[in-house]
Image (spheres, rainbow, N blue to C red):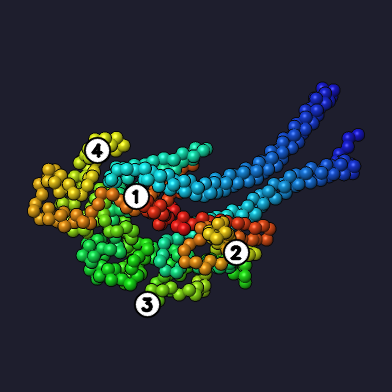
């Protein structure tokens, strides 16, 4: 009897302690739950704010960055003494650094990614929609003979942007997508032979093999800078149209017809781009921001078209 | 003699402790939920406004050059050239007092151009969609370089052929006023 009693007595405090422990556990759980609700609210608040701030920072910062890159590009062209623009120089990426790790990269020829690899689009090496004749226009992909005649005699000419060609009867959006990287509305109709894509050379009246030969020639022909002009480095390309035929003859055998084709084309060719497509890519640290595609006229220091992506 | 069950006083004490604790918990919870709803409502509304205004600014900056008289600006309405699915178009922004909304209307140039090549200055707004709802007022101002005063002035109307240097949109909702100044790169 006594033994049982002591057992009960020793049992009771233990149960009480366990009960006490349970209430501490419940209290702790409640505390954790309430704290986690608060922490979640705080986290989502901070997360949303920081995300919005980052997005807005990108939108706000890239504008002045783009403007200073345009100014830098004008400055660069003004100090450029060379009488020709080669493919290498126009596609070379230059970088403008700002504070806090922000920077903007700029280059002059658009590197459009097509199905058949990278294609370079230079504003000064495209067919001019306002000036091209019917037989040049109809050789472009997506333009039928009828559409070419409609474009050449359109009452909406001169076009102020390439897309205005859609106002012409017989030109659809699908057609435009085929030739929009080959045409321009700026300039006096001269094509920079250093950067002209094959389709443009073919449209101008060269046959495919001659166009390919010309493209190979300009990538393998080294321009030796004249003595005394230290500023110009030697580059691959074509330095003037006058000596083009002679240099081509040394490079490869030309048939009489090919030579005549080239000679008849000479007035339409140049070695410098009058209008340039300035491409800008903004970077915030390592993160890529807005991309700009801008058409500029260095002679008048004017921006003619401004697109953001 | 052993007691089973609780006395009234014990019960009262237990209930009062429970009440105090639950009020404390409830207040903490409700505080958290208020922060949640604040984040969800007010800041999203503000962000939405900022992003929509930014879209308007981007459209303005990207307006393609056009030789026809597409740009027209008054204090309540602003029209400029744009693209709609690649084809040249005219975009108009205005404030609709009846719907309390900032409206956007896009018309294809092929629909508004006359056979002589001039543009119909009357904007048809039947296809307009609200770009921004729940606002009180929206006004436009145009930055003009006044050569006589040799200073920049904000005009309420734009009577000139060329583009203004900048456009300022002042949008007011219930609580505050937002100002967005867009510098046009083409000007």
**Mark 4 lies on residue:** A225
Q: Closer to us: mark 3 or mark 1? A: 3
Q: What separation in Å lies between label 4 and label 3 (alpha carbons)? A: 55 Å
Residue B17, picture quadrant: top right
Subunit ID for the residue under disc 2: B
SS for callout 2: strand
Q: Are marks 4 and 3 in contact (CB under 8 Å)?
A: no
Q: Position of residue A240 (x, y in %)?
A: 22, 47
**Is A18 rendered above or below residue A174?**
above
Apparent side of residue B168 relative to residue B112 in the rendered image (left or right): right
- Mark identifier at residue B139: 2
**Mark 3 lies on residue:** B115
Considering every residue shown, the one lying at the far left of the view is: A256
Q: What separation in Å lies between label 1 and label 4 (alpha carbons)? A: 27 Å
The residue carrying pointer 3 sits among few (fewer than 14), some (14 to 19) or many (20 or more) residues within 10 Å by Cα, namely few
Subunit ID for the residue under disc 4: A
A129 and B13: which is toward the camera? A129
SS for callout 4: loop
Q: Position of residue A81 (x, y in %)?
A: 32, 43
SS for callout 3: loop
């Amino acid at each position: 009897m006594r033994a049982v009693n002591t057992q009960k007595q020793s049992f009771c405090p233990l149960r009480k302690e366990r009960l006490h422990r349970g209430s501490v556990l419940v209290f702790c759980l409640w505390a954790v739950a309430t704290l986690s609700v608060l922490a979640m609210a705080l986290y989502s608040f901070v997360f949303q704010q920081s995300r919005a701030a980052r997005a807005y920072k990108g939108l706000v910062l890239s504008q002045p960055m783009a403007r200073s890159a345009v100014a830098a590009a004008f400055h660069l062209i003004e100090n450029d003494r060379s009488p020709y623009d080669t493919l290498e120089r126009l596609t070379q990426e230059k970088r403008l650094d700002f504070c806090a790790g922000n920077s903007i990269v700029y280059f002059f020829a658009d590197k459009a990614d097509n199905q058949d690899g990278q294609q370079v689009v230079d504003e000064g090496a495209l067919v001019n929609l306002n000036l091209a004749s019917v037989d040049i226009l109809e050789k472009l992909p997506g333009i039928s003979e009828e559409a070419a005649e409609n474009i050449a005699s359109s009452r909406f000419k001169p076009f102020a942007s390439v897309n205005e060609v859609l106002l012409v009867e017989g030109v659809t959006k699908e057609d435009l997508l085929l030739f929009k990287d080959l045409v321009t509305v700026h300039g006096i109709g001269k094509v920079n032979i250093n950067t002209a894509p094959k389709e443009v050379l073919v449209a101008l009246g060269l046959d495919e093999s001659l166009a390919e030969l010309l493209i190979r020639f300009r990538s393998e022909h080294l321009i030796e800078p004249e003595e005394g002009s230290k500023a110009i480095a030697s580059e691959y390309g074509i330095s003037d149209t006058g000596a083009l035929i002679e240099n081509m003859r040394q490079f490869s055998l030309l048939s009489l017809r090919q030579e005549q084709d080239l000679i008849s084309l000479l007035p339409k060719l140049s070695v410098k781009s009058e209008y340039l497509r300035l491409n800008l890519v903004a970077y915030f640290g390592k993160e890529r921001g807005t991309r700009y595609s801008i058409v500029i006229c260095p002679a008048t220091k004017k921006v003619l078209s401004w697109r953001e992506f | 003699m052993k007691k089973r069950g609780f006395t009234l006083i014990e019960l009262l004490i237990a209930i009062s402790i429970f009440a105090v604790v639950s009020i404390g918990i409830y207040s903490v919870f409700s505080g958290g939920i208020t922060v949640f709803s604040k984040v969800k409502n007010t800041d999203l509304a503000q962000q939405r406004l900022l992003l929509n205004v930014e879209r308007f600014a981007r459209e303005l900056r990207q307006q393609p050059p056009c030789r026809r008289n597409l740009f027209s600006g008054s204090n309540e309405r602003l029209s400029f050239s744009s693209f709609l699915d690649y084809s040249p178009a005219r975009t108009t922004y205005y404030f609709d007092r009846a719907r309390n909304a900032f409206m956007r209307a896009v018309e294809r140039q092929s629909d508004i151009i006359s056979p002589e090549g001039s543009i119909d200055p009357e904007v048809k707004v039947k296809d307009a969609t609200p770009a921004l709802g729940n606002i009180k007022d929206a006004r436009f101002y145009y930055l003009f370089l006044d050569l006589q005063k040799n200073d920049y002035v904000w005009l309420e109307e734009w009577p000139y052929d060329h583009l203004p240097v900048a456009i300022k949109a002042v949008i007011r909702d219930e609580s505050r006023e937002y100002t967005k100044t867009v510098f046009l790169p083409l000007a």
